[in-house]
Image (cartoon, rainbow, N blue to C red):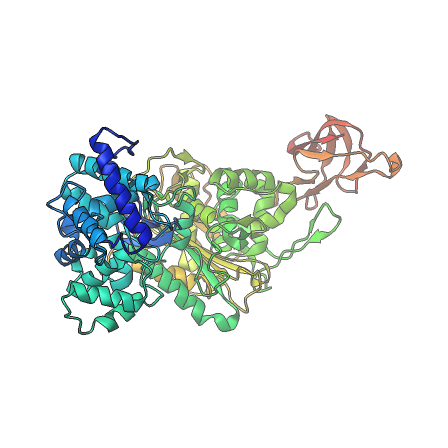
Amino acid sequence: MRHLLSTPKQAILWAGMIFILALSITGFTLAIPEVPSFDDIRDSHKSSESTLLDRHGEVLHVSRSDFSGRRLNWTPLSDISPALIDKVLRAEDQRFFDHEGVDFLAIAKAASALLTLDRPRGASTITMQLTGVLAPSLAPRSSGRSILQKWRQMRMAWDLEQTWTKREILESYLNLITYRSELKGIAAASKALFAKAPSGLNTPESAILAALIRGPNANKARVEKRACLLLVDDCEGLKDLITSALTPPYQFPPLAHAAYHAFQRLHDPNTSSETILSTLDGPLQHFVNETVRGQVAGLTDQNLQDAAVLVVDNKSGEILAYVGSSGSLSDAQYVDGVQARRQAGSTLKPFVYGLAIERKYLTAATLLEDGAIEIPISAGGVYRPRNYDSTFHGPVTVREALASSLNTPAVRAILTVGTNEVVKRLNALGFKNLMAPEFYGASLALGSADVTLWELTNAYRTLANGGRTTPLTFKVNDKTNSAHVQSEGASYIITSILSDRLARALGFGLSSPLNTPYFSAVKTGTSKDMRDNWTIGYSSDYTVGVWAGNFSGQPMWNVSGVSGAAPIWRTIMDYLHRDRQSVPPSPSPDVVTQTVSHHPSGRTVEEFFLDGTQQGQVSTVLKQRAKIIYPTNDTLLSVDPDIPASLQKIHFQASGLGDRDFIWQLNKTKMGQTNQPFYWSPAPGHYTLSLITASGEQMDEVRFTVR
C-alpha cells in the first residue's frame, strides 16, 4: 500500500480527511467525476503502435504512432500470470477483495499512526488509485492531492465498486497504470522488461513489476529492496535480474519492418494507432525482401545500390508483395521505389505495338526496317535513335523487334500509330502525370516518359488479363469495376510475342533469366546512361515488376535489365511457381493463325493475326504512314508583339514521307507541298492542318490555336 503519511504535510492531509468524513455524515457533498463503463474503458484502450498484418493475420510491420506512452493491446485478467496478481495485491492492497473501494480499516490504522506518531501507514486502495487514471482531475500532483481531491477520489472509488466487478477493476488497473518510464500497461511492461507475455511472468519478475508500481522511476537499489520484501527475502539472483530488466534500451517494442513502404501507404497519420489487414502474403514478402537485398549486395561493385519489387495477383489486383527499397542505405531506405518516377526505358514498347496491332496498322508478321533513321524535331534538330548494342539487323518482323527490344523498329511503329494516340492509351492504362505528346515525340517509344513501378506493373497485368484493367488494391476481396483498355486479340498477340524465347534470341540469346520452364511473358528496359533498369512480366496467375538502380540518380556500371532486375524477377517467379503451374492463355475469338512465308529469309512460320489482317507472305518492309509532327495536336501558339511579323514563322513538319510528295492544307486551303520546306506566318485564330495526297486522301490532321 502507498505510504501517504510519510511527511508532516500528508499527516495534516489525513487529519483533514477525517474532518471531511465527519462533514459527509451531516450531508456535505462534492461534485464526483462520473464513473465510465468498464466496456468503454477497455474498448477505448489503444496500442501506441500501429500494426500492418498480412492476409493471414501475420504481423509484417509495427510502427509507433502515439508518443504519449508505450502501450500494447489490452490483456484480459485471465491472461495475466497469477504470480503477478498475487504480488500486486500484496504490495498495493491486501484487503482488495474485502473492502468496497475505501479501506476504512487502513484509514483507521493510518489515523492511529498519526496520533501515536508511529511509522506512517498507507491507505490508498487499488480502486482509489484507478480513479486517478480514469479521472484526470483526481490524478496525483507533484505536491500531492489536496484534502478535497482525496475525498472526491474516495467517493468515486466507492461509486466504481458499485458498478464494476472486482475482476474488472483489477484488470483495468493492471492494464492502465505506468510501470516504468513510459511503459503503460502490463503487456508493454512485461514485453519490454522481460520479453514475455503477461501470462508467462514468474514470481521474481512479478515482484519486480509490483515494486515498480509504487515508484516507476525508482533506482535499481530501491526496486530491489521493495521486490525483496515481496519475495519474503528470497532474493537470490534478484539484483542481476533487475539490472538486466531495467537497463535501457528496453526490449520493447519488438518492431517488424518487413513492409515499411506498404505501411506508409496504408497508415492514416491522423490515427493514433490502428491494426491494418492487408492483401500482402507474409512468407512471400519476406522472400522478396531477402531476394532484393541479395541481388543488390552482389552488384554493389557495379554501383547498384537499390531495387524495388511489386507482386500482384492477376485476377483480383491484390498486392501480394511490396518492397520499396533494399534498405541497403540508411538515407535511401525511406524512398519508395514502387512510387518513384523513373524513365521507363523499353518497357513501354508493348503498348506502342499493341495499339498499332489493334488499329490494324501492323501485324506480328509485318517487316520493319531495323536501320538508321533520322527524325526532325521541332527545335530544329534531328533525333537519331540507336539500338542498345549500337548495331542494326536489317528487316525484322514486329515479333522479333518487340521480343528482342530493338529500338528503331519501335520508333517506326510509334510514327505509324502517332504519339498522341500512344499517350491516350497510356493514360487509359493508368499512367499518370504524362507530359503532352509533343514533349516526347518519337522518343516515347523508347521510354522517355517518367513512370512508376506501380503503373507499369498494373499495365502489364492488363495484358495478362486480355486488355481488361482494374486498380491495384491492398484490400482483401475488394470489388472494383473493370474497363477494357485494349482489345483481347491485340493483348493476346503481345503476350505471345513477350513469351517467345526464339524471337527473343536475337537480342538476348537462347539462355537468359527471362526464359522460364513455365509460361511467362516478360519485358526488360534500361533507361539512358543505365540509370534505371526494369523487368516486368507475368504468368497465368501473377505479375511481377522489378526496378533496379540508384535513388540518387547515379548511373550503374554495365548493369542492364537482364543482369540487374531480371535475376530478381526470375527468382521471385520461380518461388511463386515452385508448386503451381502456369498455363498460357488461349487465343481470343478475334485471333486467327496463318502460315507466313517471309522474304528475304524464306523462313515459314505460324503466326497470330487479328481476323482480317492475316496474310500468307510478307515480302516488303512497311512504308511509314505519313504523320504531321509539328505542330502537334492542340498546340497553343502565341504571336510575339515585340518581334516583327515578317520574322515570325511556323515550320510545318511531317515524317514517314519517303519519296512521296504530299500537300499541306490549312483550314481547307492548300498551302504548299512537302517536297520543300514550308514556313507559314501565323495570325490569331483556330486552325486545322491536314496532310493530303494529290488525289485528296487525308493522311493526318492536327488542330492548333494561335493567339
Q: Position of residue 228 (x, y in %)?
A: 19, 67
Can the viewer see residue 157 in this picture? Answer: yes
Q: Position of residue 325 (x, y in %)?
A: 44, 59
Would you say 112 lies left or right of 331 here?
A: left
| Outermost residue toward the front in this view | 116
Question: To which quarter of the image does residue 706 belong?
Answer: top right
Is 480 rendered above or below residue 144?
Answer: above
Q: Nearer the viewer, residue 142 or 135?
A: 142
Query: Which residue is at a point 43% across and 71% down the rendered structure image?
Result: 298
Query: Which residue is at a point 79% across and 42% down the rendered structure image?
Result: 677
Query: Which residue is at a point 34% across and 44% down the rendered structure image?
Result: 274
Report the number of numbered marks. 0
Q: Nearer the viewer, residue 147 or 2?
A: 147
Is 617 rendered above or below residue 578?
Answer: above
Q: Nearer the viewer, residue 595 or 201?
A: 201
Would you say 369 lies left or right of 671 here?
A: left
Can the viewer see residue 43 in this picture? Answer: no
On-image quarter of the N terminus: bottom left
Q: Nearer the viewer, residue 655 or 673?
A: 655
On-image quarter of the C terminus: top right
Q: Position of residue 355 (x, y in %)?
A: 50, 41
Q: Position of residue 580 (x, y in %)?
A: 25, 55
Query: Which residue is at a point 47% across and 70% down the rendered structure image?
Result: 299
